[in-house]
């Protein structure tokens, strides 16, 4: 294992923890969209211009709802956000084990689970987006 592997592992593990902590500190927007503006980010340009959601509309809200123990509301806000959260949480649980076992970080990209997870998330995000576009 190379020295930079330690930095990458630590950064990835800390990154999820920080994202979860930030989501916990946010107040989920009741509309299901716009929670990210509490982070001083601009509103969704696609929504503002065309009144159509982008693929990630509602992701921050779904994470905030999950961190406030409201999973059903999180699913209503953005089902793909719940899938991304669960995938990230799964990797967050796995990374310390791989790090302790001395596995180089790049082994993650060689695992079939990584490919299957990425494909599942892409299909889920695009599928939810298509469904939302058809129903808005």
Image: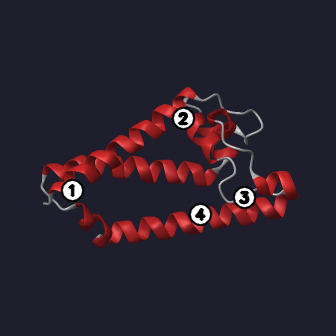
Q: Observer-nearest residue: 92 or 41?
A: 41
Question: Which one is nearer the viewer's eye here, 132 or 9?
Answer: 9
- In the visual, does 15 lie left or right of 107? right
Q: Are marks 2 and 4 in contact (CB under 8 Å)?
A: no
Return the mark for residue 23: 2
Residue 130 vs 59, above or below: the answer is below
What residue is pinned by disc 3? 54
Q: Earlier in the sequence, mark 3 or mark 2?
A: 2
| Disc 2 to disc 1: CB gap under 8 Å | no
Q: How is the image coloured?
A: secondary structure
| Disc 3 to disc 2: CB gap under 8 Å | no
- How packed mark 2 is, by other alpha carbons closer than 10 Å (few <14, some 14-19, many 20 or more), is many
Give me the C-alpha separation between circle 1 and circle 3.
Answer: 35 Å
Where does residue 44 sit, x and y in percent of width and height? 74, 50
Q: Quadrant of the C terminus?
A: bottom right
Reading the image, the residue beneath label 4 is 124
Nearer to us of marks 4 and 1 is: 1
- Which one is earlier in the sequence, the residue at label 2 or at label 1? 1
Q: Name the residue at 65% across, 55% down.
A: 56
Q: Name the element at disc 2.
A: helix
Question: Residue 96: horizontal and vertical position, in percent?
Answer: 23, 46
């Amino acid at each position: 294992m190379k020295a930079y592997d330690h930095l990458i592992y630590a950064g990835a593990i800390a990154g999820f923890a920080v994202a979860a902590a930030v989501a916990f500190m946010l107040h989920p927007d009741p509309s299901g969209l716009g929670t990210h503006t509490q982070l001083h980010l601009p509103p969704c340009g696609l929504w503002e211009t065309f009144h159509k959601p982008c693929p990630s509309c509602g992701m921050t809200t779904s994470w905030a709802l999950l961190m406030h123990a409201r999973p059903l509301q999180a699913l209503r806000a953005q089902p793909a956000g719940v899938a991304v959260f669960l995938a990230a949480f799964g990797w967050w649980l796995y990374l310390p084990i791989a790090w302790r076992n001395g596995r180089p970080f790049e082994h993650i990209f060689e695992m079939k689970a990584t490919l299957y997870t990425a494909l599942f998330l892409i299909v889920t995000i695009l599928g939810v987006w298509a469904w939302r576009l058809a129903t808005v």
